[in-house]
Image: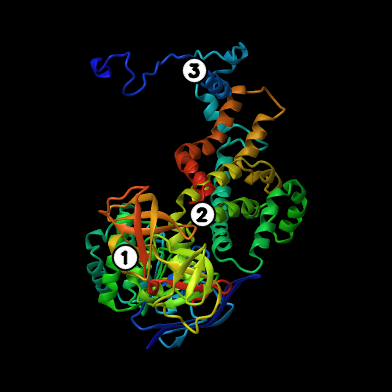
Amino acid sequence: MASAIPPGDPAVPQGPRPRRAFSARNITLYGALVLIAAYYALPLYVMIVTSLKTMPEIRLGNIFSPPVQITFQPWIKAWAEACTGLNCDGLSRGFWNSVRITVPSVAISIAIASINGYALSLWRFRGSEMFFGILVFGAFIPYQVLIYPIVILLRDIGLYGTLWGLIIVHSIFGMPILTLLFRNYFGSIPEELFKAARVDGAGFWGIFFRVMLPMSLPIVVVAMILQVTGIWNDFLFGVIYTKPDLYPMTVQLNNIVNSVQGVKEYNVNMAATLLTGLVPLIVYFVSGKLFVRGIAAGAVKG
Amino acid sequence: MTSVLVKDLTLKFGALTVLNTLNLDIAEGEFLVLLGASGCGKSTLLNCIAGLLDVSAGEIHIAGRNVTWAEPSERGIGMVFQSYALYPQMTVEGNLSFGLRNARMPKDEIAKRVARAAEVLQIGPLLKRKPGALSGGQRQRVAIGRALVRDVDVFLFDEPLSNLDAKLRADLRVEIKRLHHRLKNTMIYVTHDQIEAMTLADRIAIMKGGVIQQLDSPTEIYNRPQNKYVAGFIGSPEINFFDGALAGDGFATGGTLLPLTNYAFQGAPGAGPAWYGIRPEHILSGEVARGLPFATEVEIEIVEPMGSDTLAWATLAGIPVRFRMDGQARVQSGDRLLIGFDPARASLFDKTTEKRL
């Protein structure tokens, strides 16, 4: 009889199923995960250790070995002393240029795209679907074909070679994907909420600022991450639509790393590259959780 | 006095006609329920009255004013939605006062109205909370409060209880009825739940395919359904239908002649194919059936005990018939039992038009 077996007898299946830590399944699973993680982390590791070595040590050729003598000189040089063209003030100039490009571009594109998305999802008008279709179609045009027309356009309105010219270009190119993002997000908000606000007498802007926008933090963060990384990492528009004084950090990085004169300072190059990649990385680490939540919120119709 | 008047209302979505020249006249202080299966146009009609949908033709008058072109907020209506539709980032107080702040009402007047609504609905302790921290029943109360503070002529309810569990639904149902007694506003209430309709309504409008099938008091609708659809829709368990034909002073179906004694015909009793409907609760069983105009002995096939009463199935005139018995009745399948009914309680419908005879 079952009741004759004392409770706690390991032979009797009861309570939670026992799980072995070192089962074949676990070893395969975690082994694979560790391997893949190492594969992706290795280049980053090489960059970091190289940036902390002196040039004689690098010339020994052991790229995987940790630095014998840690030096921060390459970082200082990359930030403040490396020469690009005539300027010898390092990446710091490009950094501040990039900040002055990225902040207004992100703010303007998100502001306009959120209003677009809101209007297109909740205030349908005759032809709004067509309007949206055309806008999204813009996302599929290879932007290389637009480079030259935009040069002419910017020249004609007198913004060629200025920061504002580049900011406008970035804002426009972010529009299709951001509008799509916001439209889908607002489309997933229950329509009754919108109706309730109308019964309560709120108008187009009242509903946007007081009901919809306070609910959109997750999607605003998603848009912000997409735009910050996209605009910060942009090279092509930066090199084409600005001039040497105003080059963003990526262009300056290229000019440091790809300089054909003198000795290749690998440690400085590594430090400069890490410095340039730091901003998107920080943005992602700070708001990564919200990013995932926002993506999911837009995807699942609630 | 008329509170809400819907005149020749038509609504089309492209080629699809959802409402077709619909007329409705709702008296002041009346509780009208729009009842129907999903897709019958009841919510659409409510949205038209609220001004959330533009009508294709016709007029809507509220409190004597033509509001066909007016914004929802200018119509003197408050609306309660199925999903509550509370503003998630505002406190309960913010939710209640949102409409008043939009109307630029003085602060002390807003505070007064919010306090009154909170008192009526007993949500005073919740005022500082956000909707996320409320239960379903509390949220729906706040949603009602949002309509209440605006001091409107007409309350519109769009399936307000459908998202709640059964027990809470019954509680809030009574509370809405109590609220109506206290406020005496006109209320229009959309639901697909016939219990809600029967218990709350002064009048019920049963809709199907964008057309009002019958507009009457709950008792009239239950006792004298005007067509076969209404008869089948109202009543649970469902009414029994016999397919047959009128033959002289009886109804011939499946080899049996059901009497028509006491049946009140709408017009002249005609002849021809028809439906004969009798509700399960109007079929009596046991000794009481003996004196009725129609009585016969049947064999019970299935018994469904529900506590308060018991539903039994038997074959009568060739079709399975359900009838309601006392909850304490001790019967089992295989028992033979005398059942009978009074044709005065029956409903006859023409076979082709499905209209009441």
* Label 2: few (<14), some (14–19) or many (≥20) C-alpha neighbours in 10 Å: some
Residue A163 or B58: which is nearer the viewer? B58
Tell me which amino acid carries mark 2: Ser
Name the image quarter holding the N terminus of chain A: top left
Q: Which residue is mark 3?
A: A25
Residue A75: percent from left, percent from top: 53, 28
Q: CA distance from mark 1 to mark 2?
A: 62 Å
Tell me which amino acid carries mark 1: Arg
Q: Residue at x 35, y 78 (%)?
A: B152
Asked if the residues shown at circle 1 and circle 2 are in contact, with their CB atoms under 8 angstroms apart, the answer is no
Query: What is the number of the mark on residue B227?
Result: none
Say which of marks 1 and 3 sits in front.
Answer: 1
Query: What is the number of the mark on residue A188?
Result: 2
Residue B265: percent from left, percent from top: 45, 80
Residue A66: percent from left, percent from top: 51, 15
Q: Quadrant of residue B202?
A: bottom left
Q: How many marks?
A: 3
The chain ID associated with circle 1 is B
Q: Earlier in the sequence, mark 3 or mark 2?
A: 3
The chain ID associated with circle 3 is A
Q: Quadrant of residue B282?
A: bottom left
Where disc 2 sits, the SS reads: helix
Q: Which residue is mark 1?
A: B290
Please check whether the numbered discs 3 and 2 fall on a single chain: yes
Where disc 1 sits, the SS reads: helix
Tell me which amino acid carries mark 3: Arg
Q: CA distance from mark 1 to mark 3?
A: 75 Å
